[in-house]
């Protein structure tokens, strides 16, 4: 919302070039880290449950919240985006009456969604995670084969510098060879998490070298910022191939170093149970579903009052976090809301009600899942 040259649903009048440097600190690794954690989680889940049960639970926990969100949580984002861009002046209730008409001409400029203008927005991660989970399950015989195990045995014996290069190369090749590499990179990082998450040796190595990785990552971050400002932004519209290649190399090494450093630091300092960890383990999914809607709604309202470049963003951060806290506190206490935000139900239903609910959900999720896949 505040970065000068980057797009968002709404933009503040208080935009900053400097914030690009902060974004460059986290952008290379924040989504890959989520994919790796998801892959690690899948490896641990599949050690406890059968593949069939995993697929059923995974579909239920991902597709039901996604369907609920695109119909209830995400519409305010489009409303305030269109209002910000001057496309509409109507109130939200009138907007909703148009919103659920799939071929409504009001949305002719917003037809890139999964149902015309109805889209996943920031919840694209849930859609792709479901697809990637299906693909990963099909690859499990190969990933668990002795050939891959032997390869991983050799990888885990490497020193920190060699390990960094070996982990960087496949992702660099994906970026160079595939025109739109985001999905391929996401699946590759998910697979890497699945392969490495179970191996004690790799966690020991990451823990042992976490400060080394962190130090070199900081150096590469400085190099990345320098390259971005002095080469990337100043290159002509027809990007020079050498500039692109050098940028991809710097970006890939920077990303790998930060991933190794963060996982190592996490294993060193956060590898223990605590009440705070238990809270956030349950809160992270509802926070994720809610946060962007709160950012856009609150951000739009604050932007109407010209509060200045310090008060406005501070209020936005504080109010968004408080809204997520309050939202989660309501969600976890209301039984019917829990499964709509990916949480387990905590009440015992009569057997007939349980089977009826499952049958209805299966029909809905199968139809929705087919649409998501297409």
Image: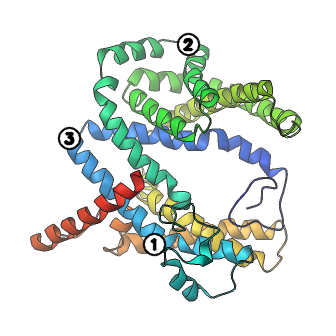
Asked which quadrant contains residue 177, the reply is: top right
Give the label, 2 or 3, closer to the camera: 3
Q: Work out how far the residue at label 1 is from the one at label 3, CA to CA, in angstroms.
A: 32 Å
Looking at the image, can residue 343 be seen? Answer: no
The answer to whether 113 appears left or right of 54 in the picture is: right
Residue 299 drawn above or below residue 273: below
The residue identified by callout 2 is 159
| Residue occupying the far left of the picture | 351
Q: Residues within 10 Å of mark 1 (few under 14, many from 20)?
A: some
Give the secondary structure at mark 1.
Answer: helix
Which of the 4 quarters of the picture holds residue 282? bottom left
At mark 2, the secondary structure is: loop
Marks 2 & 3, CB-CB < 8 Å contact: no
On the image, the x and y values in percent for residue 271 come to 44, 38
In this rendering, is residue 101 above or below 255?
Answer: below
Q: Which residue is mark 1?
A: 71
Name the front one of labels 2 and 1.
1
**Is residue 243 something that shows in the picture?**
yes
- Answer few, some or many: residues within 10 Å of disc 2's Cα (few below 14, many 20 plus, some between 14 and 19): few
Name the spot of residue 10 as percent of width and height, x first. 71, 67
At x 41%, y 55%, the residue is: 372
Compare marks 2 and 3 and give the one earlier in the sequence: 3
Res 222 label:
none
Q: Position of residue 317 (x, y in %)?
A: 67, 65
Tell me the crowding category of disc 3: few under 14, some 14 to 19, or many 20 or more residues within 10 angstroms, Cα based. Answer: few
**Of 152 and 184, which appears nearest the observer?**
184
Q: Disc 3 designates what residue?
A: 50
Relative horizontal placement of residue 14, taking residue 246 as reference (left or right): right
Q: Residue at x 69, y 85 (%)?
A: 89
- The residue drawn where x is 51% and y is 54% is 124
In three-dimensional space, the C-alpha distance between marks 2 and 3, rounded to whole angstroms, equals 36 Å
Q: Are marks 2 and 1 in contact (CB under 8 Å)?
A: no
């Amino acid at each position: 919302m505040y970065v000068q040259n980057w797009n968002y649903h709404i933009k503040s009048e208080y935009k900053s070039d400097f914030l690009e440097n902060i974004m460059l600190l986290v952008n290379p690794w924040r989504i890959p880290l989520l994919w790796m954690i998801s892959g690690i989680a899948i490896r641990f889940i599949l050690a406890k449950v059968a593949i069939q049960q995993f697929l059923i639970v995974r579909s239920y926990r991902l597709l039901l919240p996604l369907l609920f969100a695109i119909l209830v949580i995400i519409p305010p984002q489009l409303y305030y985006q269109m209002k910000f861009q001057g496309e509409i002046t109507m109130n939200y209730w009138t907007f909703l009456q148009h919103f659920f008409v799939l071929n409504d001409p009001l949305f002719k400029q917003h037809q890139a969604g999964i149902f015309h203008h109805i889209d996943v927005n920031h919840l694209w991660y849930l859609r792709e995670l479901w697809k990637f989970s299906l693909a990963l399950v099909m690859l499990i015989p190969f990933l668990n084969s002795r050939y891959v195990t032997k390869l991983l045995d050799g990888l885990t014996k490497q020193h920190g510098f060699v390990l960094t290069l070996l982990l960087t190369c496949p992702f660099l090749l994906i970026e160079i060879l595939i025109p739109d590499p985001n999905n391929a990179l996401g699946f590759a990082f998910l697979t890497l998490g699945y392969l490495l998450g179970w191996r004690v040796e790799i966690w020991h190595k990451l823990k042992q070298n976490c400060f080394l990785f962190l130090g070199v990552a900081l150096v590469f971050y400085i190099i990345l910022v320098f390259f971005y400002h002095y080469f990337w932004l100043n290159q002509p519209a027809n990007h020079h191939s050498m500039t692109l290649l050098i940028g991809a190399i710097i970006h890939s090494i920077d990303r790998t170093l930060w991933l190794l450093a963060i996982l190592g630091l996490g294993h060193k300092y956060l590898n223990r149970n605590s009440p705070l960890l238990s809270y956030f383990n349950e809160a992270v999914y509802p926070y994720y579903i809610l946060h962007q809607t709160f950012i856009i709604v609150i951000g739009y309202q604050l932007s109407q009052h010209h509060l200045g470049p310090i008060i406005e963003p501070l209020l936005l951060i504080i109010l968004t976090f408080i809204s997520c806290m309050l939202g989660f506190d309501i969600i976890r206490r209301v039984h019917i809301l829990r499964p709509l935000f990916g949480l387990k139900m905590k009440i015992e239903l009569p057997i007939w009600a349980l089977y009826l609910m499952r049958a209805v959900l299966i029909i809905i999720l199968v139809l929705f899942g087919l649409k998501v896949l297409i």
